[in-house]
Image (cartoon, coloured by chain):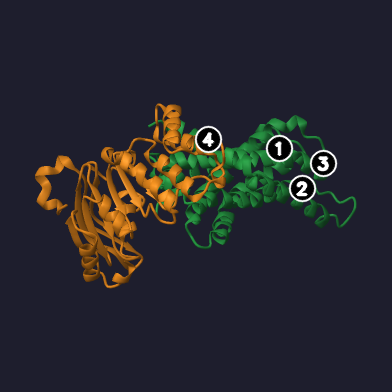
Chain colours: A green, B orange
Amino acid sequence: MNGRRQFMAILRKDLIRELRTREMIISMILFVLLAMVIFHYAFSVKEDADLTYFTGGMLWVTFIFAMLLGLNRSFAQEKDERCLDGLLLCPVDRVTIFLAKTAGNLIFLLIIQVVAVPVFTLFFVSRSYVGDLPQFLVVLLLADLGICALGTLLATISMSTRSRDLLLPIIFLPLIVPVLIAATGATTLIFAEGAGFGDLLARVLFLLGFDAIFMVAAYGTYDFAIGE
Amino acid sequence: MSDPADRRDGATSLEIEVAGLRKTFGRREVLKGLSFSLERGGFLSIFGPNGAGKTTTLRVLATLLTAGAGTVRVAGHDVRDDPMPVRRTIGLISHNPMLYLDLTAHENLRFYADMYGVDDREARITELLERLELSHRRHDVVRTYSKGMRQRLAIARAILHRPRVLLLDEPHSGLDPRAVDILDGLLAEIRDEHTFVMVTHNIAKGLDWGTDLMIIEAGRIVYEHAAGVDHASFSAVYREHVHDGSVL
């Protein structure tokens, strides 16, 4: 059986469904924009206060919470409409399901970021970081991959529980802290001072390692996670 | 239908072999050592009260649940050790259509065709939609379909990859009489091409279709018989074996 064809089928199905209903994307974009407005007022204690060193944290906290909204939805439709049974009846390697779901979540997160990052820059970043854009994009992609890989794995585990909406944040947030630390440090450095790849090497390698660990973990456990 | 131990010489013609099947949810043992087999081309109707373990049995056959103990083989493949060939061999029609409501009929079937690696995808989808009288609605999202139309599309989903074995879980449940007629017509059309296992509360349907009959109560087979039993006799047997015979 062609794993690539199955991967594309699951991804295409999730994208068509989301583009048609816009359930996830609209709620995530609204959440991100509202969070920025709230941050703007919450941190404006002094008119000329320098928020530069908070920017990385604000950005990644917003994305992680926004992704939680999306992750809850990404399996809810499979579960609610009992389509998960249909999917599991197919002769498909469970890892293919994980990879396709992770790719779908990654695409949704990137769409949110295409809207959110320019708005965030307007609100909070005082210096131009156009010259550091390649470094920023590498950090963004690696952190996104970690968030989506871990999030997809945990959303799969929690979807069969009665209190999945509560359980997912409880297990996801502590485990995503390493990504938050590395991504926040790298992003803040880029926004505040500018940073070359050399300056970011340790954090980029850390993000790569995190992504690799959770991809391997998912490879080994996903059959069990998505089963009974 | 007989115990697999008695049928080893005829193993090549057996499509389904279940021996000592047990399944536990938490502390509750739902299946308590079921053993049965079904010949290729047979139609097994499984009856029993709610909670007897009928659907659990079907879900183990479908590889959706793992057996706690015992062996289950479909088309010669062990469902636990070798599930992929089993999944290619079976189709499941449930009262739950397992369709994506925000996708069109064509998009749903295209998705499942790609998942099963159907080579003649577009031709097969067109053929099935025409056969099920859904061609005119192929580009409408399934959310706008009636229950009967969804059930017809669910049949298309289940037979899209030309499975040898069809598992039916209360397929008539919630259908109006017209939809029941259409479903029965379709089953009649594909009857000769498949082996069937049907879980049902509908004794008339089960007796009409079944070549083999079985009653499960509290996780045990309490009655099994080849077909040829009339409705009144079977109802009496059902009352005799099942505590809550009133479900008839």
User: In the visual, does A136 lie left or right of B114?
Assistant: right
User: In the visual, does B65 lie left or right of A176?
Assistant: left
Residue B23 image offset from top left, x and y in percent: 29, 60
First along the sequence among labels 1 and 2? 2
- Residue that badge 4 annotates: B136
- Residue that badge 2 annotates: A53
- Residue that badge 1 annotates: A114
Quarter of the image that includes the N terminus of chain A: top left
Parent chain of label 3: A
Parent chain of label 2: A
Residue A162 image offset from top left, x and y in percent: 50, 62
* Up-down relation of residue A189 to residue A171 (above or below): above
Q: Secondary structure at mark 3?
A: helix
Q: Nearer the viewer, mark 3 or mark 2?
A: 3
Q: What numbered label is drawn on residue A122?
A: 3
Do marks 4 and 2 both belong to one polypeptide chain? no
Between the C-alphas of marks 1 and 2, the distance is: 22 Å
- Residue at position x 75%, y 48% in the image: A33
Total marks placed:
4
Amino acid type at mark 3: Leu
First along the sequence among labels 3 and 1? 1
Q: Nearer the viewer, mark 1 or mark 2?
A: 1
